[in-house]
Image: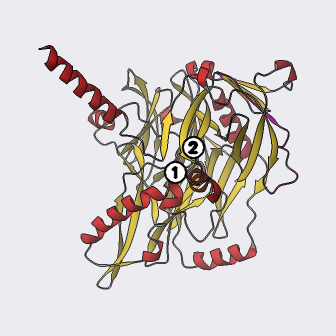
Amino acid sequence: MRKKSLILLMIFFILVSFTGCSNFSSSQKVKAPKNKSIPIRGTYKVEDVDEYKNDDVIGKSFVFKEDEFWDGVDRFIGVNYKIKIVDMSEYLLNGYKIKNNIDKGREVQVVSVLSNGNFLYDFIKINEELIMLVYNKKVYRLKKINEEYNLSSWRRNINIFNSKKDTLSKDIALYIGIRSKKDGNYQYKTFYIGASNEEIKETYVTDNIFFPRKNGFWKIDFEDSQIKVNNLSKGQEKVINKREEALFAQRMAKNNMYIDFVGNDCIVINEGDGLVERLKIVPVDSPMQQNGISIMDLLGVSYKQKFDEQREGVLRELDGEEINKEIKYENIGLVRKDGSYFLKGRINYKSGSTISYIDFNTGFFPPSNMVMYDTLCISFKDLKNSIPRAIDAYTSPNKDIAVVVLPNCINFYRIKNQKLSEKMGEIKTSQGDKIVMLEWAVGGYSQVWRDNFIKNNSVEVLNLSNN
């Protein structure tokens, strides 16, 4: 009897070992450490930056403590740290399009700093004394100058964000970007929904896409058949060289183009010439570039074989001849399924005299620079049981509010004990409308999002209860 018990116990531990590792690839391992063991504790000073002589970040100090973080301007209390083990070369290439063959195969720790679920920075630990920060496509090197930190040396009048307090706060700000089509033209609007203590307090709407990024608030709009991006926090508009502008104008003259998704650093675009419609993912900072980001650049070279196998399976069932083969790795976008984002591929093909396409779900999750938060605290199956007509759903990071998408409206519900409760309001939509962006802010950030939305836009006040 004792022998049988030992055998069963051994089988149990083996199964736990296998299931516990099934969600991670060999190229990227993630762990959430106890904050006491954060690997870059202390004060680090920015020593230099590649290819830039004059930069106001040089000389800036970053402070890491068990539950605090300071970036030289803002102090964040009650932060969380997450650690990823990555191949340094692949990480720089896939995340930032920086080629670094010297460190190929070298595993390093990437420490993410999060405040109240909001991503702040990623730091690469090189050794015990040196870390790196990639920001605005620049690579900064920071040297450790102190194991501890001195509060008296901090600048006065800094902003203090208390993540622990904010986690308990009921204040929420929500940006929803919606694409519509009217008289053959695509239009975009952004809604701001402000909620506090499980009540929607105010709602505004503005034209175009207004959204948050790590370096401020941005706007995307169309002007003269061009996508314009503008960093409103710094008053900087993307500068387009004449060659890019001419090529883009030439393509737009015959293109049916629209935005399908807006993320933290990437935009998904659907563009066509009247016959062939292709997908492409482009950086927010360069939305008019001709070539899209490939599946390998987005996720890593290890995904190439899996992607190829999936495409081959679709092609075997295809009744037609594939076209656009040369862009097969760039012909990718996003799809929503059961309340989550997945990367999808597209195959353009010709059957007889008809040109069409077929999309397939890869099952790959998009990286965090595309989708930062995408978690449902209610299972989509349970949600569909409550609201059978639901097409899609999103839930807030603090698990208080659910956004439920129906064929002709977007409804907002309270969440109680991980179940839908009372309806809080709704936004009316038209057939064919689609959510192309949805971003949350919780706690102290919600006021910042509200103020920037009103300050930077011409807004219309809405009353959700009367919509």
Q: Amino acid at mark 1?
A: Ile
- Residue lying farthest bottom? 353
Residue 108 in the magenta stretch? The answer is: no
Q: CA distance from mark 2 to mark 1?
A: 8 Å
Which residue is at 23% across, 21% downward?
9
- Quarter holding residue 228: bottom right
Image position of 436 with respect to 294: above or below = above
Instruction: Judge by depth and name the residue closer to the eye, 316 or 31.
Output: 31
Which residue is at 45% across, 62% downward?
332
Disc 2 and disc 1 in contact, CB within 8 angstroms: yes
Q: Which residue lies under the disc numbered 2?
A: 191
Which residue is at 33% across, 63% downward?
309
How many neighbours does mark 1 have within 10 angstroms: few (below 14), some (14-19), or many (20 or more)? many
The answer to whether residue 165 shows anywhere in this view is yes
The answer to whether residue 100 shows anywhere in this view is no
Q: Which residue lies under the disc numbered 1?
A: 178
Instruction: Judge by depth and name the residue closer to the eye, 163 or 399.
Output: 163
Image position of 33 with respect to 254: above or below = above
Q: Check the picture and name the quadrant holding the N terminus.
A: top left
In this image, 128 relative to 199: left or right? right
Q: Amino acid at mark 2?
A: Phe
Magenta span dominant secondary structure: loop
The mark nearer the N terminus, 2 or 1, is: 1
**SS for callout 2:** strand
- Range of magenta residues: 51-67
| Residue 56 position within the rendered picture, expressed as x and y whole percent measured from the top left | 85, 45
| Residue 296 position within the rendered picture, expressed as x and y whole percent measured from the top left | 49, 60
